[in-house]
Amino acid sequence: MQSYNPAVSHKRKERDIAKLMMSNYHVEQCAQNPYNFKVNINGPSDSLYAGGVYTINVLLPEQYPYKSPSIGFLTKIFHPNIDEASGSVCLDVINQAWSPMYDLMNVFEVFLPQLLNYPNPSDPLNPDAASLLIRDKPRYEKKVKDMVLKYATKHNKEVQNIEIIKESKQDDEDNVSLISLDNVSQLSEHSYGHAEIQSLF
């Protein structure tokens, strides 16, 4: 590995992120760390993931580009080489064979599309997906497409976001109710009269 130069690394990070932003990808940088960001990619049109939109979390390490970026799927996906729970990716060119000659455009234009097009069940991060692909390919393909429809289509992703917001609001309302009940209980312990308690609400 080439020797690490902080100035060169910083310049390269800025350049590669700028190239990504000027492309057709939606990039959302983290406010606390500009080198941690999310990128939306479309499932390759000639793959089982066609029609899906996937949000990828990217973290550029301090030694980038001498050290590979950390890549993970935030959108749920059924694939032998992608951990269904964590979204971690098993891809040699990123995990083992990375070179400073590669950049982020290579990751999103070449490496990830190839991963989605050509799953490798012999080196799985999702054993269930790998086993199903080997034993029953039609069922595997149906499972993939069902997951695309459920988690990666634009409409369903928007519905899930609305449900998450509703759940958050409900949790807030429940917390307010619990606080109010606690207040009544505490007031009762201090022997407040009924009329006095009512006047506090």
Image: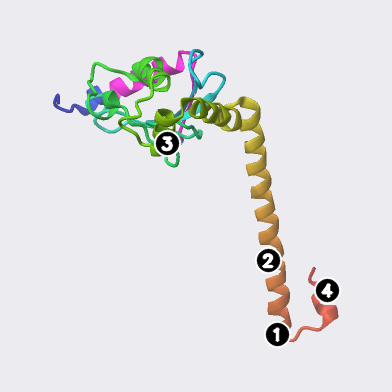
Tag 4's secondary structure?
helix
The mark closer to the camera, 2 or 3, is: 3
Label 4 neighbour load within 10 Å: few <14, some 14-19, many 20+: few
Using the rendered view, name the quadrant where residue 106 is placed: top left
User: What residue is shown with label 4?
Assistant: 198
**For discs 1 and 2, the disc positioned in front in the rendered view:** 2
The reply to whether the C-beta atoms of the residues labelled 2 and 3 are less than 8 Å apart is: no
Report which residue position mark 3 lands on: 87
Amino acid under label 2?
Answer: Leu
Q: Earlier in the sequence, mark 1 or mark 3?
A: 3
Question: Within 10 angstroms of label 3, few (less than 14), some, or many (20 or more) residues?
Answer: many
Q: Which numbered disc covers residue 190? A: 1
* Mark closest to the chain's N terminus, 4 or 2: 2
Q: What amino acid is at disc 1?
A: His
Q: Quadrant of residue 125?
A: top left
Question: Which residue is outermost to the right?
Answer: 195
